[in-house]
Amino acid sequence: MRKQYHFWPAEQGGAWDAWDVDRLIRLARELPVVDVPVDSIGELDTPYWTLPGDPPPTVRDVVTHMRLVRDVDPSHPVVLGVDGRVMDGMHRIARAALEGRTTVRAVRFAVHPEPDHRGVRPEHLPYDDSPDRPGHP
């Protein structure tokens, strides 16, 4: 699987705090799994896979995400932050919405984990060599 990070704006403008998604999944393993209404996921109505200042997605970018949505394993719960923010699993949520499901399985942190990187630019983080690693969350 390709290396992934969850990003949230850092205190200093133009930079990001980043969580290693592999670590988030490990931390979330023991959390209770619940059904969350798909319509309650606010990120469905945001430009989630791009960062502010990024150009609009190309058709090729959309196709890449379509493949990821198609190939995702929906049996894994999505990971939500304390505030309900999606920290991992947006492609699973997109698949649920596409299939007309009303809920998605999820875990939610009761205490927000510390980020793995503070005040960074996505392109400065370590990634694997996959072709779809352009620094997008």
Image (cartoon, helix red, strand yellow):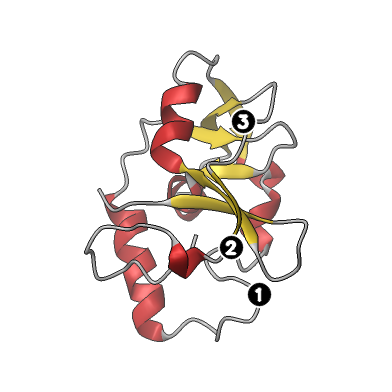
Say which element carries label 3. loop
Q: CA distance from mark 3 to mark 2?
A: 20 Å
Point out residue 37 in the picture as x, y percentages from the top left corner. Answer: 64, 36
Instruction: Name the residue at the left extreme.
Output: 129
Q: Count numbered badges in the picture.
A: 3
Q: CA distance from mark 1 to mark 2?
A: 10 Å
Q: Is residue 118 visible?
A: yes
Q: CA distance from mark 3 to mark 1?
A: 24 Å
**Residue placed most toward the observer, 102 or 104:** 104
On screen, 83 above or below 31? below
Q: For the residue marked with disc 2, what is the amino acid?
A: Tyr
Rendered image: mark on residue 113? 3
Q: Residue at x 54, y 29 (%)?
A: 106
The mark nearer the N terminus, 3 or 2, is 2
Point out residue 29 in the picture as x, y percentages from the top left corner. Answer: 44, 19
In the rendered image, which quarter is residue 102 located in? top right
Point out residue 131 in the picture as x, y percentages from the top left corner. Answer: 25, 71
> Which one is in front in this view, the residue at disc 1 or the one at disc 2?
1
Point out residue 97 in the picture as x, y percentages from the top left corner. Answer: 52, 51
Q: Residue at x 40, y 51 (%)?
A: 4
Q: For the residue marked with disc 1, what is the amino acid?
A: Pro
The mark nearer the N terminus, 3 or 1, is 1
Q: For the residue marked with disc 3, what is the amino acid?
A: Pro
Say which element carries label 1. loop
Q: Is residue 136 visible?
A: no
Q: Which residue is mark 1?
A: 52
Q: Which residue is mark 2?
A: 48
Q: Are marks 1 and 2 in contact (CB under 8 Å)?
A: no
Q: Residue at x 41, y 25 (%)?
A: 26
> Which one is in front in this view, the residue at disc 3 or the one at disc 1?
3
**Residue placed most toward the observer, 22 or 107:** 22
Say which element carries label 2. loop
